[in-house]
Image (cartoon, helix red, strand yellow):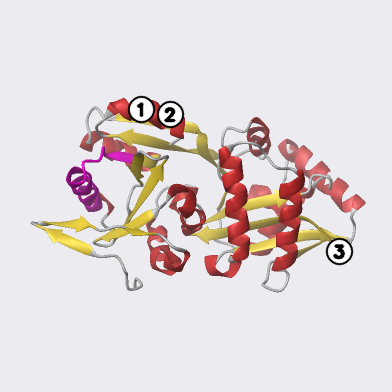
Amino acid sequence: MFVRLRVQIVKTGSYFMLNFANLTLQDIKTIKPYFHFQQSRICDDTAGVVTMWRDYFHTEFAVSGNSLILKLHFGSSITGFQIPLGKDWIAALGQIELYCRKNSLPLIYCNVPDYALPYLRNRYPGAFIQPSRTWSDYLYRTEDLLNFKGKRYDGQRNHIHRFQKLYPDYQFTEITEENLPRIRQFYHFLSAVREKPGKFAQAESTMVEKVLECYAEYGQFGGFVETGGKIAAFSIGERVNDTIYVHIEKADTRYIGAYQVIVQEFLKHFSCTGDIYVNREEDVGDDGLRKSKLSYHPVALLTKSTLIANGSSLTEKIDKNGL
């Protein structure tokens, strides 16, 4: 059963007018059941990503029938809707259309997974559709990242072996409320010495700090690798259906092989028999990050698109705001 909602839905004629509420961390228990209806494995269809980035996108939510509708804001002038999640997601599109008409908003869908595009093309003939390589998710087989078997993973195995040789006392520990202050201190150190320029990088740093402040409330799982009493890397994620999503992964690169070790140890500790895939999210256009994610040999890049059903003059604004 779904948790009782605080979102109101106002009836207008034969339709229901959506009444959106600002998404708060306390709403995670309300929205989380809907993500099990996801069909795409994109990270945007997880409770973790939606709640972690709620401040950056000023995320709002509403419910239509048995479907969750998310409204995101890009910059000060663009509003987009994610594809609804639930049994009645197609019917919920009608509620979004009504809402946009009543509020004089262009109809924009963001983070559209590939499975929904054929239906949307038919529903909105002539719509502008823009896929984004920058925001495509990297999907891997759990078995590959657990074992790093075969010649193509020589690099990863070599880094792990070197780490093991240099730091034979290393261990992986699950994050708890007791050791969380150590993780926060470690991340503060990383942020201070390896701060990346750019608005999105700064937003990510703020997001990570907020997650670590309220770690238990997100309902995720995480762990860290330490050696000699010092943390070398940590990772945080969640599970939805058959996929593990790695939302946060940070390492001190002075420890050679720390990233490869945290990737493997995280899955050794948390993956279960039914976890077929691992989503390690986007490269956000960072060349170094793209090279690194490709080196782990993804089985798929999960494309996300922006669809504008009307108001094609917004395409230039959308390019600048990075939908």
Relative side of 79 to 24, left or right: left
**Residue name at image x 67 percent, y 32 percent:** 291
Query: Dots 1 and 3: beta carbons under 8 Å?
Result: no
Check if residue 92 falls in the magenta segment. Answer: yes
Element under disc 1 = helix
Q: Quadrant of residue 194?
A: top right
**x, y percent for residue 208:** 61, 54
Relative side of 31 to 16, left or right: right
Element under disc 3 = loop
Label 2 vs 3, first from the N-terminus: 3
Query: Dots 2 and 1: beta carbons under 8 Å?
Result: yes
Element under disc 2 = helix
Q: Quadrant of residue 124?
A: top left
Q: Which contiguous range is marked in magenta?
A: 91-109
Q: Amino acid at mark 1?
A: Thr
From the viewer's perspective, is the residue at label 2 or at label 3 nearer? 2
The circle drawn on residue 319 is 2
Residue denoted by label 3 = 229
**x, y percent for residue 148:** 72, 46
The quadrant of the picture occupied by the N terminus is bottom left
Residue denoted by label 1 = 315
Q: Nearer the viewer, residue 223 or 39?
A: 223
Residue lying at the far left in this picture: please name it.
Answer: 13
Rounded to the nearest whole Å, what is the CA distance between mark 1 and mark 3?
51 Å
From this viewpoint, is residue 260 visible?
Answer: no
Relative side of 56 to 308, left or right: right
Q: Amino acid at mark 2?
A: Asp
Neighbour tally class for label 1: few under 14, some 14-19, many 20 plus, Cα within 10 Å: some
Query: Dots 2 and 3: beta carbons under 8 Å?
Result: no
